[in-house]
Amino acid sequence: LHFNRLNGSLPSDILSLPSLHSVYLQQNNFSGDIPSSLSPQLKLLDLSFNSFTGNIPISIQNLTNLTGLSLQNNSLTGPIPNLNLPRLKHLNLSYNHLNGSFPSSLRQFPASSFKGNSMLCGSPLNQCDSITPSPSPSPSPSPLSSLFLFLFSLFPLFYIS
């Protein structure tokens, strides 16, 4: 069902079918969280090039048969769960908004698998102390303080007249 312009949230019932081995749903318009109920038989999960948000489900770490996981080009956030999956041969989490320290269980994968996650750090990526968070925007003044500043700026006009 890839390249079909399917949209909306992905029903959790689909990914939890007990005999499901492969899911190819890349290049659709799915959004929302990736369901956490996943078939334990999954070998391949490709949800790349959609609009998924939220964290990578921690339940992925229970997919002991998983050989391929492609979640690139979504809007996933948060840290990468510690995926100790011995059969995992292909992993692509690039171009999301993932952050935090890189799990040591995934160090065998190339840095290109994680490219485009500027707040993700640790080997094979940048050292964590070299990542500085972007400055937070300064808070906008409250309406009351804006009114006070406006009236205060008019005060000299009345005083001079």
Image (spheres, rainbow, N blue to C red):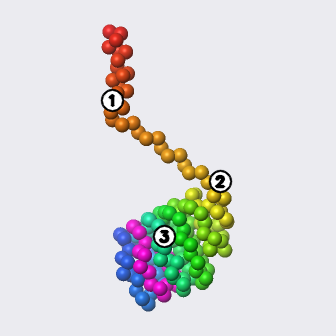
**What residue is drawn where x is 56% and y is 72%?**
82
* Residue 145 relative to residue 47: left or right: left
Q: Is residue 132 magenta?
A: no
Q: Nearer the viewer, residue 156 or 91?
A: 156
Residue 29 appears in view: no
Three-letter code for the amino acid on which mark 3 is drawn: Ile
Q: Which residue is mark 2?
A: 130
- Earlier in the chain: of badge 2 and badge 1, it is 2
* Residue 9 rendering spot, x and y as whole percentages: 36, 71
> For the residue labelled by badge 2, is the local secondary structure a helix, a strand or a loop?
helix
Three-letter code for the amino acid on which mark 1 is drawn: Leu
* Residue 60 rendering spot, x and y as whole percentages: 50, 77
Q: Label 2, label 1: how many angstroms apart (C-alpha)?
A: 42 Å
Q: How many marks?
A: 3
Q: Quadrant of the C terminus?
A: top left
Q: Magenta part of the protein: which range?
A: 31-48
Instruction: Say if 40 sits above or below 73 in the image.
Output: below
Q: Which numbered tag is attached to residue 56?
A: 3
* Residue 33 relative to residue 124: left or right: left
Displayed quadrant of residue 154: top left
Q: Which residue is mark 1?
A: 147
